[in-house]
Image (cartoon, rainbow, N blue to C red):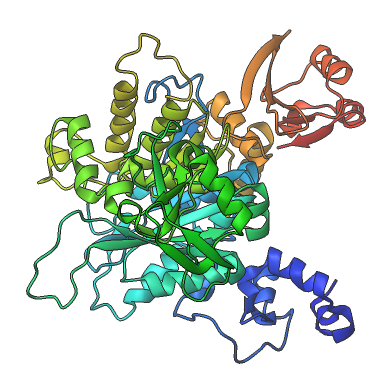
Amino acid sequence: MSIEELKRPERIDEDRIEKLKELFPEAFGDGKLNLQVLKEEIEGMDDDLVEDSLEEFFGLQWVGKREARKLAYIPPQGTVRFIEGEGFNENKTKNTLISGDNLEVLRILQKSYMNKIKMIYIDPPYNTGNDFIYQDDYKEPTERYLQKTGQADDEGLLTTNPKADGRYHANWLNMMYPRLKLARNLLRDDGVMFVSIDDHELHNLRIILDEIFGEENFEGIITWRRRHNQPNDKTKMIGKVSEYILAYAKNSTKYKESGIGKIDITAEFSNPDNDPKGDWASKPWKVGSGQSGSRYKITSPTGVIFEEEWMGDKDTFQEFLKEGRIYFTRNGDGLPRKKYYRFEREDEGQCATNWWHHEYFGHNQGANQQLTRLFGRKNVFSNPKPTKLIKNLLKIANVKDEDLVLDFFAGSGTTGHAVMELNKEDLQKRNFILIQIPEKTQENSKAFELGYTDIISITKDRLKKSIDSLNENEKNNTDPYLGFKVLELRRTNINKWENAITDSITDIESKLDLFTTNPFTADSVDLDIVTELMLLKGFPLDSKIKNEEFGNNIIWFVQHEDVPFTLIVCLDEKLYDKSANFLVSNFEDSMLICPDASLTNKQKIVLSEVMNVKTI
């Protein structure tokens, strides 16, 4: 259907609008469809497709927004490879830590993890004027990343964003926008995203999240008291004790249908009357102001008569009284209250509110103390989040067995630690993917003093130390849900055509010969090539990879329970007939990838009759 057809009123009905809103929430402002944004989303800024657009619509505009949107559509230029020996239980676990630029890694994960993540949590730079933000590039992002990794000069991967900069807010929005767009793609329909922020960018973040997710999928803003003490700063009118967590569902209806998660009970329970049912708390039986109920008389144990509007009818009250569920205040002289028991609340859980007190949800000092216990030194990492906070986010997102959690601003690895800690507590099997850029530590920092030259090394060690802590009293340390493997962002293993204007015919012919005989880079390793190909074809990182020898061929097989076909890869210069016949006989409806030069014309025909054949 063309844009012109969409513009005709008779073609637009409620179902189509809802479908468009689901697919392109960015194209709606104040409930109106913005054709200009829709055109950019569909055609990647093809200005010839649509001539007119709505001149006025609600939304946040800033310098660089079009380019930021474009960044989300650049195909991945690199891949990731497994780094053996860097993790823990790495051959058994699904948990993954990826070192690299999170924007490029999110691009790489798009096909394999589209609609598969249950919860995303990020704690990005808050744009205070003192922290670092990413310097994104439009061309050769992976090459630039690899060139800059390890350098400590002014051409690094991150840059300061002082408030004096004329594009202070725009720079931060340009960093966040493409990452949030790509993140939304990865969420399941019942998935939830949480973003921590303070008041520097809260207002702007809310608007762009409304645009990307659709404001109907906004679930709320959690105000978290991050400080347990009271500030006494004479230079400030209002001292900061809280931060915010914005919560969005990918599809609010689907999230609620799948089940809203509950937090642990926070009410205080006791048993002053030795009730055989155990500890209890109470709530008024009298209705609150502005509410209606049933009106009748109640006589207290001491003879006081009350005639009020009550929460339930008289028969219900008498039944509760007989069960011992009614408690009269002021030693029997006061109004009745209804008991509710600890065991009941523990069974049904408690709904979260938008105010999270440090006593129940953790605070910054506690998070610092937790890291100090793990590392044996203070100030290894600045301002980590407490695991208690993240565990409660996991609970209200309703993350359960085998669900997947993503954090692409991983920092010290609190999200991974929290996932494993919660698994240990309730014996469930959640998994995580963490992404962290190898940002250099300052040479005068405690981390550098301890030998941590970059943030990713802190992340790895924090995960290992947290596993040791969780396994402290156990002999068996092979639980795959207490482990992780490490991957890193690398350049592609597939040769790219680079045709310079000054190339001669001989140069071009030489390049053609190279592409014909060997499509892979000189430093490529077979396992890395297979990993890159499986990601391109939608296989997750925890896929089962094995290779077998058939005569003179080594053939790789990739399988995953969520992918309906087997990926077969042969990287040899020639596929022998014995191998081809074996594949034809045993792998119908599979996919074969191999160098084009390795197949004869006859093999291409025969293999294509039973499987999907892709050549490089």
- Residue 436 appears in the figure: no
Residue at figure coordinates x 17%, y 36% from the top left: 372
Which quadrant would residue 132 be assigned to in this image? bottom left
Q: Position of residue 534 (x, y in %)?
A: 64, 34
Q: Position of residue 450 (x, y in %)?
A: 14, 33
**Left or right: 582 with respect to 386?**
right
Q: Position of residue 23 (x, y in %)?
A: 70, 64
Residue at figure coordinates x 59%, y 50% from the top left: 191
Q: Nearer the viewer, residue 177 or 594?
A: 177
**In the displayed structure, would residue 40 be above or below residue 197?**
below
Could you tell me which quadrant the N terminus lies in?
bottom right
Q: Nearer the viewer, residue 518 or 551?
A: 551
**In the displayed structure, would residue 530 be above or below residue 139?**
above
**Left or right: 252 with respect to 446?**
right
Q: Which residue extends farthest bottom?
A: 55
Q: Position of residue 311 (x, y in %)?
A: 55, 61
Residue at figure coordinates x 49%, y 80% from the top left: 60
